[in-house]
Amino acid sequence: MTYKTAKLENWQWAKEIRLKHYKKLMSARENGTPIVAASGHGPWSVVAGIGDFAALCGEPWSGSTGYYPDLSLACAEAAEARGYGRDVCGYMKLYFGSMFLNKGPFGEFPKPDLVFQSLDCDLEPHWYNIVGKELNVPVYFVEIGTDFNHLKPREASIQYLVDGYLRGIEWLEQKTGKRYSDELLIQAVTNNWESRRLWTEVCEMQKAIPAPLDIKSMFTLFIPAEINPHEAESVAFYKALKDEVKHRVDNQIAAVPGERCRIIHDSVPPWYALHIFRYMEEYGVVAIGGSYVFTLSGSWVEGEDGHLKPMTSIPGVHIPPRNREEALRIQAWIDMSVVRPVSSMDSAIFIWKSLVKDWKCQGAVFHVNRGCILMGYGMVEGSRALRAEGFPTMVYEASHVDKRDWNESDVRDRIDSFMESLGLKRVTT
C-alpha cells in the first residue's frame, strides 16, 4: 500500500526559529545583550528573570559545528592538541575546539558573560569549569540529582533543585547587577511547560499508522523546545505543528508513503550521516522516533501500567505558577523528566519497550555512540531485552559528531542484514 504524502508546512518555521536564535547570539555583543552559556536544555526559564539575554547552548552549538566536516575536524584536532582524547564527549570536544580556535559555524566563538548550568551529565562540571577558567567568566551549577526512581522523581530531588535555583537567582542578581523579575520567570516557565507539553503530544501522535512524521524531520522540529522553550514564539510554533500533525493523522498523510515497517532509533544520531534514515526508507521503513527525540524536549511520566504517557500536570503547583517557588518547582520537574530516561537501566529498558510496543513498531536500531557515553548507556542491554521479547534489533557504533568514527559500508551492511531479519526488500534502487 502507498499512502499519500505532503510537505510539512511548519518545517520552515522551525528553521526560522533556529536561524533567529543564532542571529541574536552572534550579534549579542554589539547589541549589548548578555550571553549566557549552558547546555542545550539549560535552565533558560530561570535565566529569563534577569530580562533579555542570548543563549549559547552547548550541544546545539557543537552539533552545528559537527555538520561541517572541515570545521568539525579542525575543532576536534584543536581540542586533542590540548590533551582531550578521542574518547571524551564529542560535543564537549568540538565546543572546546571552537572556543580555542575562536571559530564556529556562524563566525567567531561567542564568548559568554556567565555560565548558568543545570548538570545532568558527569562531564558537564568539567566542561563548564573549563569554559569559566579559559574565558575568565563566572560559573554557577545546579545539579540535577539522578535518584534512580524511574516512575516519578522523589520529592527530595525536586526540592533540592528548587533550593539550588533559589540560590542561583541571588547569584544572577549579584553577577549581572540586575533586579530579578518573578513575572518574567513565571511567563518563561509557563512557555517552557507549554512548549514541551505540546511537543509531547506531537510525539504521541506518532502512534498513528502511517506515521505523520519521520525521525529525520523530528530532529529539526524538536530544536525550538531545546534552545527557546521559554519564548512565546516556540509555544505558537508547537500549537501550529500539533494542529498540522493532527490533520495529517486524520487524513492518513504519511511521512514515508511506502511505510511497511516501523522502528525506533536511539540515541543521538550521527549528525553528518542522517541519510541512513533515507536509506531505510528505501525498504519501506519509517523511524518514528526514540527516547532521545521524544524525551529530551518532552514531558513524560512512566505509568504504573507499564506505558509511557504525556505528563498533563505537576503535583503541588498551578500552571501558570502563582509565585517564584511554584515556577521553580515546574522547572525542576521538567529537568527531572529529561534525565529520567537514562537514570537507570530499568528506566531505559522500560521506555524502549513502551516505545516499541505502544508506537506499534516491529524493531529497534541502537547507536552505541562513542562520542557520548551517557546516551550510549544501556544500548546493548536494551537490544537484548527487546530481542528477548521477539523484536529484531540492530546495533551500530559511531560518533554523533566525529566523522572519523563513521564506517559507511559497515553501517549499510548492518542495515541490509537488519532489513532481511524483518523480511523486507528494497522497494527502490
Image (tube, rainbow, N blue to C red):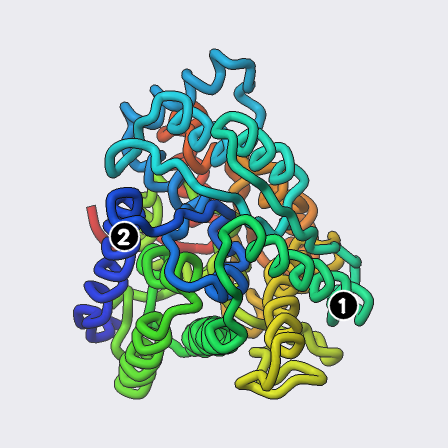
Seen from the viewer's position, the closer of residues 111 and 64 is 111
143 to the left or right of 246: right
Please tell me whether mark 2 sits on a helix, a strand or a loop: helix
Q: Which residue lies furthest to the top in this view?
A: 81
Which of the pair 62/429 is nearer the observer?
Answer: 62
Give the residue at mark 2.
24
Residue 296 shown left or right of residue 278 in the figure: right
Q: Is residue 395 above or below residue 357?
A: above
The answer to whether residue 205 is above or below residue 144 is below
Q: Which residue occupies the foreground of this view, 306 or 117?
A: 117
Residue at position x 34%, y 26% in the image: 102
Q: Residue 248: x and y, percent? A: 28, 80
Q: Which residue is drawn at 51% across and 48% down?
A: 39
Q: Distance between the residues labelled 2 and 1?
A: 34 Å
Q: In this view, does 102 lie to the left or right of 309?
A: left
- The residue indicated by pointer 1 is 159
Q: Find residue 50 and report its horizontal and vertical position in percent.
A: 47, 62
User: Which x, y percent locates residue 129?
Assistant: 60, 33
